[in-house]
Image (cartoon, helix red, strand yellow):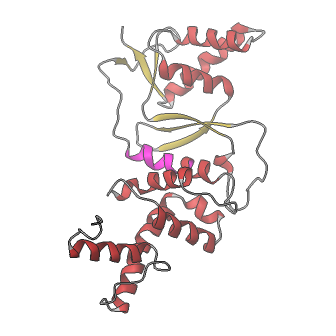
Amino acid sequence: MSSQNSQPEFIKRQLEFAAHIRNPDVNPAPADVDEKRMAAYRELFYNNIDDQLGNAFPVIKSILSEQHWDEIVRDFYHVHESHTPLFSEIPQEFISYLEHERNNDNDPPFLLELAHYEWVELALAILDEKPDLNKININGDLFSDIPVLSPAAWPLSYHWPVHQLSAENQPETLPEHPSLLVVYRDDQDEIHFMEINTVTARLLALIKENTEFTGKQLLAQISDEMQYPDPDSLIDAGKTILKDMQKRTILVGTLRK
């Protein structure tokens, strides 16, 4: 006996109802449910998902045609099996869908990266992680001591210029260089997006994993990696970068000794 046949009747009815709601073009409605009521359920459930995704990914929605957006939302609704009951986590489920289940040549090539970039703002807004102030000197000298990256500051790298994309700006060819960004939540809980250069991106990557070296030592390492012709000027410029990132709360202080 199959597992479906062994299920209680009310479970079978629920699955039949849900299958129709998810994809009414493929799955018929339960025979004994009034069509007007069924239509109300279809509209209510779909609109909830559509509104949630539209609010989370407004740039994507503005770039795509109404028909294309509707097709993606309905496909997500139909094929993706979400692993959370929380509405706040649906955008992350949508990214998982784009990455692992979506395969349509009509989609913009930057769709997944743009979705991730838009999701980051929401993720940082609700992030509950905070720095352990017992281990941090918020007034420490980042150049002479060990700098600490805020858990609410995320260095990011994208192949496409996601921070510049819009309905009016949609490049068709991949840029020569990646877009390097840091997205962070400040001490007033405001979200900021900042474009950074390769030196700053490398510095943040080192700081994120570092518990041993001072800011000056990390900058000297970067100078060696780049074989920079004038190490002192790079280190001096890096000192200014450290101060600026501390002011922005991207760096929250130094590790207590």
Residue at far front of view:
1
Which quadrant is the N terminus positioned in? Answer: bottom left
Left or right, 103 with reference to 151: right
Residue 121 colored magenta? yes
Front position in the image: 134 or 85: 85
Give the percent coordinates (x, y) of residue 206.
Answer: 54, 19
Which quadrant is the C terminus positioned in? Answer: top left
Give the percent coordinates (x, y) of residue 187.
Answer: 41, 36
Magenta span main SS: helix
Give the percent coordinates (x, y) of residue 100.
Answer: 54, 51
**Residue 151 position (above or below residue 30):** above
Residue stretch in magenta: 117-126
Q: Residue at x 31, y 88 (%)?
A: 33
Residue 120 colored magenta? yes
Left or right, 169 with reference to 145: right
Q: Residue at x 71, y 8 (%)?
A: 231
Left or right, 114 with reference to 52: right
> Within the image, what quadrant is residue 168 found in?
bottom right
**Residue 129 position (above or below residue 101):** above
Q: Residue at x 55, y 24 (%)?
A: 205
Front position in the image: 103 or 183: 103
**Residue 124 position (above or below residue 144):** below
**Residue 43 position (above or below residue 253):** below
Give the percent coordinates (x, y) of residue 30.
Answer: 34, 84
